Amino acid sequence: MPKSITLAKFAGFCYGVKRAVETVKKLKAENPERNICVLGELIHNTQVIEELNALGIKTLTELPQKGEGICVVRSHGESPEVFKKIEEAGFKVYDLTCPDVKKVQQKAVEMAKEGYYTIIVGKSEHPEVIAIRANALQYSKNVLVADTSDKLESYKKELKEHKKIGIVVQTTQMISTLNDIIKFLTPLSKELLIANTICQSTAMRQSEAKELAKDSDLMVVVGSKKSANTTHLAEILKDITKTIHIETEKELESYKDLIESSQKISITAGASTPDNVIQKVIQNIQGKGE
């Protein structure tokens, strides 16, 4: 029996990622003899990193003391200190911080400057959050990162005394996480300033996927297990219908029976998942249904 397979409209590269990948390739094409490197993975996707490597664009896991050529700051952004270190090492900096991430950094800085106890809703070890925090810490020591209200429990007294609390959000976070933290902080503050900085692309991707899930027997989420927005997509959808999170079509073999028993299958993908990876997944599922 032929299956119904639906691909989400908001699946794959967001504009920040698209811009980063295209710009880095263009940089290399225009400067073939120069050393072009990226500090950290440009995006959380193994296939893209391998493709860039094949073009001669190196991914640096750490900054060398001495370097030359162009060093790209990826879409997640970096701390002011890292920008300085890149230049001191001898590189020319090329800043590809996503404009939406820049906005979060600016909001966090404004709040810190204006005396708000700044809460960053996000994962403390995520590169985007590390950079947002570092930017805010230049102006205030009162900066906390939390992705559950439990993580703020031990700061309750301190937050209550401070009265003014500001909230910014990692661009790829879930709205439910933000709501949980707002609910916790509301009784503690005299003034609560909330900047919902979840980017539009993430919000639309999550909202569309939730609607698709309501009418699907199976949701397939394609993208890196290291990608925050992809992992969050899978988490949200698991509560609605059967959901699998895969990085490439090769993993579909393990879910053969589930795919065969599902009639309506919908596919979505994270912001750092290339189109050709999504297409291979669709072709593989179509093949399993024949």
Image (cartoon, rainbow, N blue to C red):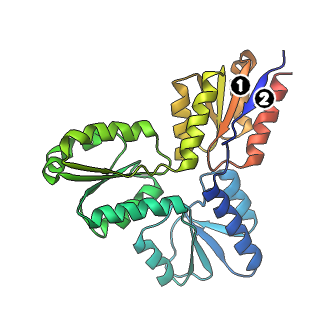
Q: Is residue 213 left or right of residue 186?
A: right
Disc assigned to residue 265: 1
Q: From what the image shows, is residue 97 above or below residue 242?
A: below
Percent x, y of residue 202: 55, 45
Task: Spot the residue most to the right.
Answer: 290
Neighbourhood count class around disc 1 (C-alpha, 10 Å): few under 14, some 14–19, many 20 upward: many
Percent x, y of residue 26: 73, 71
Q: From what the image shows, is residue 41 above or below residue 175?
A: below
Q: Residue 241 versus residue 92: which sits nearer the camera?
A: 241
Q: Earlier in the sequence, mark 2 or mark 1?
A: 1
Percent x, y of residue 256: 73, 23
Task: Please name the amino acid that badge 2 sits on.
Answer: Ile
Mark 2 highlights which residue?
A: 285
Q: Which residue does the image show at 42% across and 49% down from the upper left?
A: 196
Q: Which residue does the image show at 72% across and 21% down from the upper left?
A: 264
Task: Please name the amino acid that badge 1 sits on.
Answer: Ile
Could you tell me if the residues under marks 2 and 1 are in contact, i.e. CB atoms within 8 Å? yes
Q: Which residue does the image show at 69% across and 36% down from the upper left?
A: 8
Q: Residue 288 versus residue 143: which sits nearer the camera?
A: 143
Q: Is residue 258 left or right of residue 161?
A: right
Percent x, y of residue 126: 45, 53
Q: From what the image shows, is residue 290 above or below residue 230?
A: above
Identify the image quadrant of the N terminus.
top right
Q: Secondary structure at mark 1?
A: strand
Residue 226 appears in the rendering = no
